[in-house]
């Protein structure tokens, strides 16, 4: 019997979504890791139009005078990070005093030029793949049917119930397991329509060449250093989304979830099939 005729089998992800998912996963990790190497060249963040070594950053990662490593937020929050951030040992056992360690960056050995090449190349892959996915999802109505939450789902009562269910690890079952729940939809909408466009625009704002054509972006984000700070925060917001996403995949059943993102087919839990 074909899966489409078998009880409990749901066609969950169309092929454009699956292709974009895996291409996007590879691209985002390369962008994040090469971005960390770029950050290592100047591990401080500022607000405004300019920022240099003697200006006051709102965030900095580096070594301490006493021989450790730390993250400093403003002038009041000091977070010890010795051995992980700010001061760590490289592949050869040599102590380094850069912000992020070699295992989190591309390239693994310090190279600002190399990191920029990786970053700019995969930034174009990211934009072109995302644009193709966006256009395809508009044509096949994927956004409207599967991603955008309905008015009923946005009601506080409905959202609060979904939050409680997730907190208690009561994950959707049956046909509901084959659809995005309200919290998933809000997360995907935030990433696709807010976080990703913001990352692209702030990335363009940091480009002197692009500023010549569209200087309005500098005004929109309050200067190149503010754009860099927003870009950094968006990148870690995307990383947080990925971590939560992976955790939820593990809790929901990694084999079933991975199969649905590779073949498109998702199998509803057996106990629900008997009663649904």
Image (cartoon, rainbow, N blue to C red):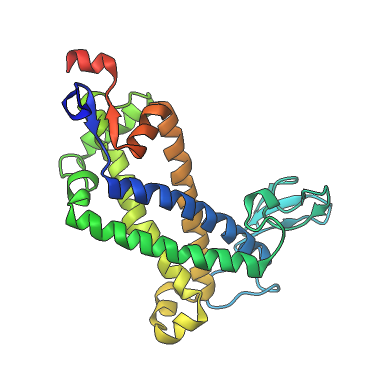
Please state the horizontal and vertical placement of residue 218, each as a whole percent of the image: 44, 78
Q: Can residue 123 be seen in this view?
A: yes
Please state the horizontal and vertical placement of residue 175, each as a whole percent of the image: 20, 27
Give the quarter of the image for residue 117: bottom right
Vertical arrangement, residue 240 with respect to residue 123, above or below: above
Please state the horizontal and vertical placement of residue 122, each as a whole percent of the image: 49, 62
Q: Is residue 207 left or right of residue 113?
A: left
Residue at 66 percent across and 63 percent down: it is 43
Vertical arrangement, residue 119 with respect to residue 250, above or below: below
Residue at 45 percent across and 44 percent down: it is 242
Q: Nearer the viewer, residue 5 or 160?
A: 5
Q: Which of 174 and 169 is in front in this view?
A: 174
Please state the horizontal and vertical placement of residue 212, each as a whole percent of the image: 45, 86
Give the quarter of the image for residue 65: bottom right
Q: Quadrant of the N terminus?
A: top left
Q: Is residue 153 left or right of residue 131?
A: left
Q: Nearer the viewer, residue 183 or 110?
A: 110
Q: In which quarter of the image is the C terminus?
A: top left
Q: Which of 150 and 265 is in front in this view?
A: 265
């Amino acid at each position: 019997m074909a899966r489409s005729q078998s009880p409990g089998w749901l066609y969950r992800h169309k092929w454009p979504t699956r292709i974009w998912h895996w291409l996007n996963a590879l691209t985002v990790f390369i962008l994040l890791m090469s971005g960390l190497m770029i950050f290592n060249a100047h591990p401080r963040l500022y607000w405004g139009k300019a920022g240099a070594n003697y200006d006051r950053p709102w965030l900095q990662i580096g070594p301490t005078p006493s021989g450790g490593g730390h993250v400093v937020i403003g002038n009041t929050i000091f977070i010890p990070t010795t051995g992980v951030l700010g001061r760590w040992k490289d592949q050869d056992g040599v102590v380094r005093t850069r912000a992020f360690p070699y295992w989190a960056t591309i390239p693994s050995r310090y190279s600002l030029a190399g990191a920029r090449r990786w970053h700019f190349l995969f930034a174009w892959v990211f934009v072109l793949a995302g644009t193709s996915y966006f256009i395809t999802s508009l044509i096949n109505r994927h956004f409207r049917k599967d991603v955008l939450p309905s008015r009923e789902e946005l009601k506080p009562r409905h959202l609060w119930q979904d939050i409680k269910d997730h907190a208690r690890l009561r994950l959707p079952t049956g046909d509901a397991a084959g659809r995005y729940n309200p919290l998933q939809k809000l997360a995907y909408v935030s990433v696709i329509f807010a976080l990703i466009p913001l990352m692209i625009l702030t990335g363009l704002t940091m480009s002197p060449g692009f500023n010549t054509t569209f200087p309005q972006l500098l005004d929109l984000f309050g200067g190149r250093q503010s754009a860099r700070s927003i870009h950094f925060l968006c990148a870690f917001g995307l990383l947080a989304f990925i971590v939560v996403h992976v955790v939820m995949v593990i809790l929901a059943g990694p084999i079933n979830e991975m199969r649905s993102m590779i073949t498109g087919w998702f199998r509803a839990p057996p106990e629900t099939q008997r009663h649904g």
